[in-house]
Each structure stands twice: as structure tokens, then as C-alpha cells.
Image (cartoon, helix red, strand yellow):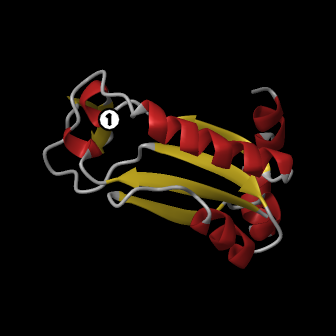
Amino acid sequence: MRFMMLMIPKGYETAAPGTVPDAKAVESMMKYNEELQKAGVLVALDGLHPPSMGARVSFSKGKPMVTDGPFAEAKEVLGGYWMIRVNSRAEAIEWAKKCPGGDNEVIEIRQVQEMEDFPADVQKAAAGFAEMQQRQ
């Protein structure tokens, strides 16, 4: 099973462009990342620039509309993520609990939908998806 662990740092929704984490926090996080890697559960990880540097594309009546960040209505935003491969939701939770997160940080854990989770008609509609993933 694959799980996304989504880091949600409170206050990041209003962070200025170019905001970067504290070096000590990064050092602690790297130790955690190395632990995930050594355990063989880490698939991918990345940090994200603040929303002030992003954009959102919404669709009204099929027409795309672009809104540049920051986003006034945002209450929670992603600061980064880990993709891990573990045997259960409980194991994913245990890994998240080991993260050296600060008082302003929350990790949301979401299981990734695997093709075998879908009925046959959805699998047929998604033909070629596995090949797309491998071309990354």
C-alpha cells in the first residue's frame, strides 16, 4: 500500500515568496527522511514553495480561470509531502508520529488509490495509466 503523508504547516498560507525553512528544522527533518529511506519505505518526498508563488486553475462552465497566489480563502496549505510504501494504515500512522514536526505542523495521511481498487469499467477507462507512471 502506498500512502501520502501531507505536511500542513499553519501560517504557510500567508508566507512571503522565497520563504524557506530554518536550517535546524531541515537538519531534523533530514534525519527523519533518512530513517524512512533506511527502512525501505520511502518512495518520494518534496517540499513545496509557499502559495504566494503558486497559482490555481478553476473551471467554471468548462472555462479555465487562473488565480495567482496567495489565496485569501486558504485555511490550510501543503508545505510538502512524503510518499511511502507500507503494509497498513496503522504503519503509515506510526511513521507520521515519528516526524519531528513543530507545534504549527500537522501531517495528513491519505492512502493512494491503486488500480486494483477500482471496478473493471474504471480500470478499462484508465488503460495506459501504469505506463504513464513509469515514464516519469
Asked if residue 7 is positioned above or below residue 67 in the image, the reply reads below
In the figure, residue 104 lies in which quadrant? bottom left
Res 75 → quadrant:
bottom left
Horizontally, is 43 left or right of 8 in the view? right
Residue 9 in the image: x percent, y percent?
Answer: 35, 51
Is residue 60 shown to the viewer in this render? no
For the point 19% across and 40% down, the residue is 14
64 or 132, which is in the foreground?
Answer: 132
Q: Between residues 54 and 36, which one lies in front from this camera angle?
A: 36
Residue in front for this viewpoint, 36 or 119: 36
Residue located beneath label 1 in the image: 57
Residue projecting furthest to the front: 24
Q: Is residue 99 left or right of residue 67?
A: right
* Residue 72 pos. (x, y %): 13, 45
| Badge 1: residue crowd in 10 Å (few <14, some 14–19, many ≥20) | few
Is residue 88 in view from this perspective?
yes
SS of the residue at dot 1? strand
Q: Vertically, is 126 above or below 105? A: above
Up the image or down, 23 lies above or below 124; here it is above
Quarter placement of the N terminus: bottom right
